[in-house]
Amino acid sequence: MGEVGRAILEGVLQLGPHVVDPPVVLAPMAGITNVAFRRLCREQGAGLYVCEMITTRALVERNPKTMSMIRFGEGERPRSLQLYGVDPATIRKAVEMVVAEDLADHIDMNFGCSVPKVTRRGGGSALPWKRKLFREIVTSAVAAAGPLPVTVKMRIGIDDDHRTFLDAALTAQDAGVAWVALHARTAAQRYSGEADWSAIAALKQALDIPVLGNGDIWEATDALRMMAETGCDGVVIGRGCLGRPWLFADLAAAFAGSSERVLPSLGEVAALMYRHAELLTEWLGTERDGVTDFRKHVAWYLKGFPAGGELRRFMAMASSLGELADLLAQLEHAAPFPREILGQPRGRTGTPGKVVLPDGWLDDRDSDLVPEGAELDDSGG
């Protein structure tokens, strides 16, 4: 049956030599899943924490911003790196660089991004439509990675008329990836509507390797329900942890069989907010940079809690740890967690929209031509 089959039967998610227990993966999110946020989440619970998406061309060219983004914290193991690219040759060079310079312990390939600047170049969720190009990219990445495990993340397809996940996942399995993660939306849905968990179940039935599910996991109970309904082997957490790093503690408790929820008081949330800003300061080098970067997290942390508009506004303008601490001290620390917001979406939602693609992209599924300009201006992660 092999190691993968035994791992599934034993209820253990294996990633090369690493056991992912509980079977929870932090999804890469631009501007969010940096060293500081990953450490904050790791302090709450175990799992696999992936860095922000890195473009292969920028990595090969050693773009300074990109090189800073691939740093990992002390004791952060396994080091998980997500790569995005369109050209098989560049992707191979990037993976060879990761291996030769020991930059990571795991490589995840991004075929799920739906933002226009990526799909208009044929990347992200647009790429699996090109079957031959997709096969070349995944096969070259796995070959170049050697002993490092490679995984892929994808969406259902471009839209309902151009679904790609089953064909692409089978191709990825044949290429030797360790697992496939599926965000159960099309690129056209973006982050709107509801994720179609039945697609995760269909993928699980089609593959022999582990399948991870992503989409609409807002609480630990959602993760357990997804696994029960779809049979998937693990879950990928994205927007659900925005302003809620304790979700990983809640997930760890749920997977351990506990029915107790992790619902912090406002005082406990304030302590986590300060810790987050402190870690960002340590990573970025100055209080001004660290606290400024933290500002975008304030509304997520305080969602549903009693905190006046003026206090929230001042926090979103803070520029030092001392200033932030003084503002946090003004919160009603005894206030309990607002249960009425449980299960509510967080972060981006938006509306569906037409996917921006290269000219003629849908005409020939078997073309392996890299779109002209696909790798241009591809710097800075």
Image (cartoon, rainbow, N blue to C red):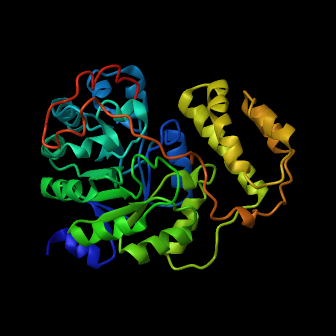
Q: How far across and down, in percent of the image, does residue 204 sit?
A: 29, 69
Locate residue 232: give its quadrant.
bottom left
Image quadrant in which the C terminus is located: top left
Locate residue 14: give its quadrant.
bottom left
Q: How far across and down, in percent of the image, does residue 249 sit?
A: 57, 63
Give the left or right position of residue 211, taking residue 366 as reference.
Answer: right
Give the left or right position of residue 277, taking residue 44 as reference.
Answer: right
Give the left or right position of residue 97, taking residue 281 as reference.
Answer: left
Q: Nearer the viewer, residue 181 or 59?
A: 181
Q: Nearer the viewer, residue 199 or 142?
A: 199
Vertical side of 94 occupied by 335: above or below: below
Q: Nearer the viewer, residue 200 or 351?
A: 351
**Residue 233 in view in this figure:** no
Q: Measuring 77% from the left and 33% from the top, which residue is drawn there? A: 322
Q: How far across and down, in percent of the image, does residue 275 sit?
A: 65, 44
**Residue 182 in view in this figure:** yes
Vertical side of 188 occupied by 10: above or below: below
Image quadrant in which the N terminus is located: bottom left
Locate residue 253: give its quadrant.
bottom right
Q: How many tags in the picture?
A: 0
Give the left or right position of residue 277, taking residue 268 as reference.
Answer: left
Q: How far across and down, in percent of the image, does residue 373 sit?
A: 27, 21
Q: Nearer the viewer, residue 177 or 371?
A: 371
